[in-house]
Image: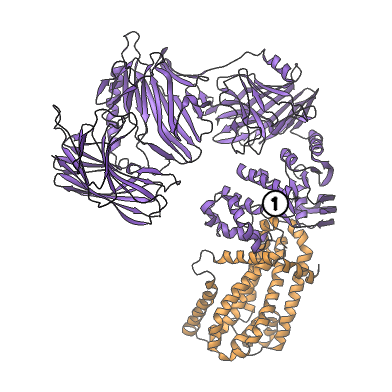
Chain colours: A purple, B orange
């Protein structure tokens, strides 16, 4: 039974030609004598040039136009997707619009209700489904429109090149849905210029030309007939030699071997990245300059860039080799970030190879990813890459190799796996960022690519490729005065040299972090060069299977300075612990200096894991290193400057204060690798990252003589102090009580006695354990919150902190008391959440060596600290008072007063703990913890008492 | 296609038309705090204004002058609004026509229906005022639905014509507004028909809007059954208008739609 039946359909438009103010109306026949039968369940693609009458034909089938001649018979319901997005009412919500639009499609209310949930899920709008459509982004709007349209389930679906609009997400979902409709036996009539998509969906093709059906038959025959017959048109040309064929079609190349097309998706094309936009060679007007049996020269003028491309395509003297020489002709200076020559090949190609290694694509079927997957980041910079297709039962595809004869430092050859839309493997030659920043190209001509595409028998090809020199170029960037940063691709290392001397050692620059209890290091990862130029080296680092990626961006910034930014790219919400960035320096570096102190890391250590030195002042972020070598062989002094600003809690750029620490390490059995690390540590145990990109580190390393660098530090210090104190940067307030000073500093309280600090590390802080976010239990510390000072009086402070991620607000009141401070904390929950444990803690200076509890238990703090573990020395319920003091131990013991920390919150459920922290903090901790509920119970919104206590100072024995 | 075929087809698309009417109404009232109640409030406020002007500033001899005017004015604004909206409706909704399988008539029809709903809501809101001021009219109210129906059919017919006409003659929408203004003063809305000389009354009666106005006024203001000649005119104009509208629309829609 025919779903659609057209008999001699014709349609004319009346067009008014205006000449000399006179109007000459003329009839123009958009369609003539179209006779077409489409049986139920068949998918048909209508192919043709612009203006061939394709859209008019769809409109006639949809019933919008009544034909002037002939007749139309339709059997079944029709959903035309010709003007998707029409009919929406901007003021109505997404939900209301679903009902509105669906009923315009002719659905009854109960039918809409039954598919409402599917539509909402498909559109993935989240809460926005209840917001007015006018507040939607273009993408959301299109998604909703698509979602409604493809849930109509008509008998006949008419689609007018919707693949030209919408993002990849919408395209992919749309394709999935269309395949489903096809399985259900619905008829699809598709108009598209994308012949690859046509071939995937439709078994039958109808070629229209000037309003008449020229050919009607199997899709493959119609497509190839179309390509051949339109050959006399501009922008299309064919070359054929033996079994190898090339078709050039307006900026896209497709290759065929025998009966098989070996390209897929977009085929061969050039893409140019400029100012964040991708401009592809098919977005250009193409003209045939020259054409004979063995050579085509075409020129394309880009639509949005002031340049044109000249492609010269010819067969090499060797059989089975096609040469493509691509020249850029720049008419006026413009800024270009990247040039890529890409060939997409059929997914039957499952193996790739280069001069050094070969491998398989991860899975035989393409991943359902929207982003292209790089097959293997380990491919070194080589001069050729190729693909093999293991022999299938149906056809034997030839091997193909891709060589770029124009080889520059900044060019990379890569293999990629594309996405579901293209279903192809891609070979690429990329010219990345040919200058430090974007390249500002002067007008003129330059040949950027000379691609040799070799197609043929695998053995023959391998034999021929052996004649090519094996090239592997490490990437080097070099500054004035011989500062060199060298990147060794295979060893995954970046090292810093100065006048031939190696400043870094071991693994050089290195990152590591803990994810789900396992440690990952940059040396385990896949590396890929992201950007490279004379003064810039940027590496992209990926751990297989992890939602975490890093981009290291090194730049030579003149004056012997190298800057390094480490950016974390988080692909899904995740928790990372101990995120570190390290620079391993040569063991010759022993001395260190900051603006206020200096020291020595001592002799090489043996028998101990490592030795750490903690700077007294960890706010300055600048640290210098000096070497102890002989004068003539001495390494220059270096200065490491952490340019991270204080954290901004309300934005996504999440960083914490990085403690500048010098570690000397003897890594045991391997040689005398006594390296010096400059290490930055996230002082937090674990950090919850949302999907997004974060600047995790911002460093610079300056090389110079010791006096110069010391001068620089002192000069910098003034700048830094003033910026530390700027109120917009640091929320800080102080109250004084006799010799004692209480300082509130962004989520933690510090107590000083005269000029000596009693507290250390986090000082006074609160911490709650909640499952409020992501349903994973986690500690949220007052240092995370964003704080405001509500009132600051002479003897009291009122502070209010709003927690990120969980709906919690705390109000702290700190008041003077004779010889001490009262600390009251109230909390407010503004949305029901689980708060399982709550703590109020105080971290004390390591000088304290003795503790005592209210039940007369007492003990000493050990002299040393564990590497990363915190030791619990005492924990007991129903204890309301803890104190710490310094037992007489020679001189200096009376510097700090004794301290007692009391909790009045009682009576029950409170545990007092005494802990010794780890080497990083080197503090003693006194704390009170209460457990609220089992983790299933939620706290209702409202105000709660959190902690009420006091800190008494003086003689506390 | 005969008028009967068309009615069958339209009734098959009643869901679609319902949505289009809703969409039209939300255009008018969404975002406003009291929404559709404006349809009631608006004539009430007009009544207050008229009352103030014609009792305080410029007193007239006609008793209950606000009701005298409102009995005709509401129906007129339904007629005038429908026409001016219908004139641009197909052009403004070309995207909708391109995307959904909807009968072309549904677009002007939904405009007229939306205005009719609006009119009815205001009307029903005001009815108690009419009754309270003149209890006699209760007897004649039974005839009201018939006038409403005839008036609706008449308006729909004209709307069909202007909606399709505007696609051919782009000036039509402009001309229409001026024409409506002229017609407004040619219709006895602000004055009784009798106050005009006999010779001019002929012109007035030839104006199709007059018969409906007089019938509304007879039923709502005088409480009479209305002049039988006027009833005859009303029937005649309605039938002529809907037939002509249908004829022109069917004949011209094929070509007209190619214009958009």
Give the vertical position of A36 relative to A865 (above or below).
Answer: below
Residue A896 lies, with reference to residue A102, above or below; the image says above
In x, y percent, where is residue A568? 46, 34
Question: Which image quarter is the C terminus of chain B in?
Answer: bottom right
The structure residue drawn at horizontal position 81% and vertical position 34%, both measured from the top left corner, is A228
- Residues B63 and A898: in front is A898
Query: Percent x, y for residue A68?
Result: 83, 56
Query: Within the image, what quadrant is residue A618 found in?
Result: top left
Q: In this rendering, does residue A653 appear at all?
A: no
Q: Residue at position x 81%, y 22% from top?
A: A242
Asked whether A775 or A850 is in front, the reply is: A850
Mark 1 element type: loop
Residues A542 and B175: in front is A542
**In the rendered view of the protein, which quadrant contains the N terminus of chain B?**
bottom right
Horizontally, is A853 left or right of A622 in the view?
Answer: left
Residue A548: give x, y in percent of width and height. Answer: 49, 34
Whether residue A708 can be seen here: yes
Residue neighbourhood size for the residue with mark 1, other residues' Cα within 10 Å, grouped as few (<14), some (14–19), many (≥20): many
Q: Based on the displayed image, in which of its 4 quarters is residue B245 positioned?
A: bottom right
Image position of A766 (left or right of A260): left
Looking at this view, is A517 or A82 the one in front? A517
| A582 displayed left or right of B244 | left
Please name the residue that numbered disc 1 is placed on: A82
Q: Is residue A51 above or below residue B38?
A: above
Decide if residue A147 is on the left or right side of residue A873: right
Q: Chain of mark 1?
A: A
């Amino acid at each position: 039974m025919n779903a659609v039946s057209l008999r001699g359909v014709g349609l004319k438009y009346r067009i008014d030609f205006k000449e000399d103010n006179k109007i000459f109306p003329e009839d123009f026949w958009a369609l003539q004598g179209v006779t077409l039968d489409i049986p139920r369940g068949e998918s048909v693609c209508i192919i043709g040039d612009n203006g061939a009458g394709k859209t008019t034909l769809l409109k006639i089938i949809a019933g919008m136009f009544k034909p002037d001649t002939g007749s139309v018979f339709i059997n079944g319901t029709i959903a035309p997707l010709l003007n998707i997005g029409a009919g929406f009412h901007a003021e109505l919500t997404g939900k209301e619009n679903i009902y509105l639009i669906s009923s315009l499609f002719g659905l009854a209310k109960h039918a809409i209700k039954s598919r409402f949930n599917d539509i909402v899920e498909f559109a993935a709008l989240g809460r926005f489904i209840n917001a007015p459509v006018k507040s939607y982004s273009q993408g959301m709007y299109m998604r909703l429109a698509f979602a409604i349209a493809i849930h109509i389930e008509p008998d006949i679906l008419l689609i007018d090149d919707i693949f030209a609009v919408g993002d990849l997400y919408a395209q992919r979902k749309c394709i999935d849905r269309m395949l489903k409709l096809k399985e259900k036996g619905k008829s699809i009539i598709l108009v598209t210029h994308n012949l690859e998509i046509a071939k995937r969906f439709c078994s039958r093709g109808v070629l229209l030309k000037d309003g008449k059906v020229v050919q009607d038959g199997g899709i493959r025959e119609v497509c190839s007939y179309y390509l051949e017959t339109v050959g006399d048109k501009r922008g299309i040309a064919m070359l054929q030699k033996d079994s190898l064929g090339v078709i050039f079609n307006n900026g896209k190349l497709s290759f065929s071997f025998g009966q098989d097309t070996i390209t897929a998706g977009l085929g061969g094309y050039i893409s140019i990245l400029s100012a964040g936009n991708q401009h592809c060679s098919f977005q250009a007007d193409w003209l045939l300059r020259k054409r004979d049996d063995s050579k085509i020269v075409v020129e394309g003028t880009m639509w949005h860039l002031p340049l044109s491309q000249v492609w010269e395509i010819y067969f090499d003297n060797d059989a089975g080799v096609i040469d493509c020489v691509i020249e850029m002709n720049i008419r006026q200076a413009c800024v270009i970030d990247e040039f890529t020559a890409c060939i997409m090949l059929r997914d039957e190609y499952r193996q790739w190879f280069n001069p050094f290694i070969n491998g398989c694509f991860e899975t035989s079927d393409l991943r359902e990813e929207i982003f292209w997957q790089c097959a293997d980041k380990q491919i070194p910079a080589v001069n050729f890459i190729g693909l093999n297709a293991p022999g299938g039962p149906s056809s034997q595809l030839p091997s193909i190799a891709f060589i770029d004869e124009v080889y520059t430092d900044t060019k990379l050859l890569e293999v990629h796996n594309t996405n579901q839309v293209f279903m192809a493997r891609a070979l690429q030659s990329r010219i990345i960022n040919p200058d430090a920043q974007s390249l500002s190209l002067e007008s003129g001509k330059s040949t950027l690519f000379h691609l040799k595409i070799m197609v043929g028998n695998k053995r023959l090809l391998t034999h021929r490729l052996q004649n090519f020199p094996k090239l592997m170029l490490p990437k080097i960037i070099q500054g004035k005065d011989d500062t060199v940063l060298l990147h060794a691709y295979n060893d995954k290392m970046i090292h810093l040299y100065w006048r031939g001397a190696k400043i870094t050692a071991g693994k050089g620059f290195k990152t590591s972090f803990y994810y789900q209890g396992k440690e990952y290091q940059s040396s385990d990862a896949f590396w890929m060069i992201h950007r490279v130029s004379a003064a810039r080296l940027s590496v992209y680092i990926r751990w297989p299977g992890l939602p975490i990626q890093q981009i290291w961006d090194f730049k030579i910034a003149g004056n012997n300075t190298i800057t390094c930014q480490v950016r974390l790219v988080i692909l899904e919400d995740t928790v990372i612990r101990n995120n570190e960035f390290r620079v391993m320096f040569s063991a010759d570096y022993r001395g260190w200096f900051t603006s206020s102190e200096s020291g020595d890391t001592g002799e090489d250590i043996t028998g101990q894991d490592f030795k750490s030195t903690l700077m007294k002042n960890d706010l300055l972020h600048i640290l210098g290193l000096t070497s102890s070598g002989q004068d003539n062989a001495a390494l220059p002094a270096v200065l490491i400057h952490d340019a991270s600003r204080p954290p901004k809690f309300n934005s996504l750029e999440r960083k914490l204060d990085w403690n500048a620490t010098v570690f000397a390490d003897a890594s045991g059995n391997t040689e005398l690798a006594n390296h010096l690390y400059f290490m930055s540590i996230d002082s937090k145990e674990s950090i919850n990252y949302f999907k997004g990109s974060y600047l995790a580190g911002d460093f610079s390393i300056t090389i110079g003589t010791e006096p110069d660098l010391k001068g620089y530090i002192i000069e910098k210090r003034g700048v830094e102090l003033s910026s530390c104190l700027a109120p917009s940067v640091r929320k800080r307030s102080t109250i004084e009580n006799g010799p004692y000073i209480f300082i509130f500093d962004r989520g933690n309280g510090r107590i000083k006695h005269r000029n000596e600090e009693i507290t250390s590390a986090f000082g006074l802080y609160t911490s709650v354990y909640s499952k409020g976010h992501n349903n994973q239990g986690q500690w949220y510390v007052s240092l995370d919150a964003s704080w405001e000072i509500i009132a600051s009086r002479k003897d009291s402070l009122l502070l209010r902190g709003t927690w990120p991620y969980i709906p919690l607000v705390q109000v702290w009141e700190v008041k003077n008391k004779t010889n001490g401070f009262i600390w009251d904390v109230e909390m407010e929950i503004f949305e029901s959440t689980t708060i399982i444990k709550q703590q109020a803690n105080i971290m004390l200076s390591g000088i304290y060596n003795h503790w005592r509890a209210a039940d007369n238990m007492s003990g000493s703090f050990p002299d040393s600290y564990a590497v990363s573990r915190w030791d619990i020395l005492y924990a007991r319920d129903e204890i309301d008072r803890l104190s710490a003091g310094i037992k007489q131990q020679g001189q200096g013991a009376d510097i700090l007063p004794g301290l007692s920390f009391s909790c009045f919150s009682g009576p029950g459920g409170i545990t007092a703990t005494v802990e010794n922290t780890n080497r990083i903090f080197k503090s003693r901790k006194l704390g009170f913890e209460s457990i609220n509920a089992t983790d299933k119970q939620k706290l209702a919104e409202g105000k709660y008492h959190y902690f009420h206590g006091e800190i008494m100072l003086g003689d506390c024995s | 296609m005969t008028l009967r075929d068309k009615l069958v087809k339209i009734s098959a698309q009643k869901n679609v038309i319902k949505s289009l009417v809703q969409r039209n109404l939300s255009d008018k009232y969404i975002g406003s705090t009291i929404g559709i109640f404006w349809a009631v409030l608006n004539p009430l406020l007009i009544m207050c204004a008229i009352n103030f002007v014609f009792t305080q500033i410029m007193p007239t001899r006609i008793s209950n002058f606000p009701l005298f005017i409102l009995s005709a004015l509401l129906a007129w604004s339904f007629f005038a609004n429908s026409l001016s909206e219908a004139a641009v409706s197909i052009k403004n909704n070309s995207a909708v026509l391109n995307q959904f399988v909807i009968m072309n008539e549904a677009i002007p029809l939904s405009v007229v229906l939306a205005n009719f709903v609006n009119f009815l809501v205001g009307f029903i809101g005001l009815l108690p005022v009419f009754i309270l001021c003149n209890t006699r009219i209760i007897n004649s109210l039974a005839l009201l639905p018939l006038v409403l129906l005839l008036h609706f059919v008449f308006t729909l017919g004209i709307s069909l014509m202007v909606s399709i006409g505007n696609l051919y003659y782009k000036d039509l929408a402009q001309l229409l507004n001026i024409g409506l203004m002229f017609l407004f003063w040619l219709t006895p809305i602000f004055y009784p028909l009798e106050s005009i000389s006999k010779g001019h009354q002929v012109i007035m009666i030839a104006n199709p809007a007059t018969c409906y106005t007089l019938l509304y006024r007879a039923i709502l203001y005088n409480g009479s059954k209305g002049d039988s000649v006027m009833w005859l005119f009303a029937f005649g104009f309605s039938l002529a208008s809907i037939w002509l509208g249908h004829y022109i629309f069917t004949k011209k829609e094929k070509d007209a739609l190619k214009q958009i």
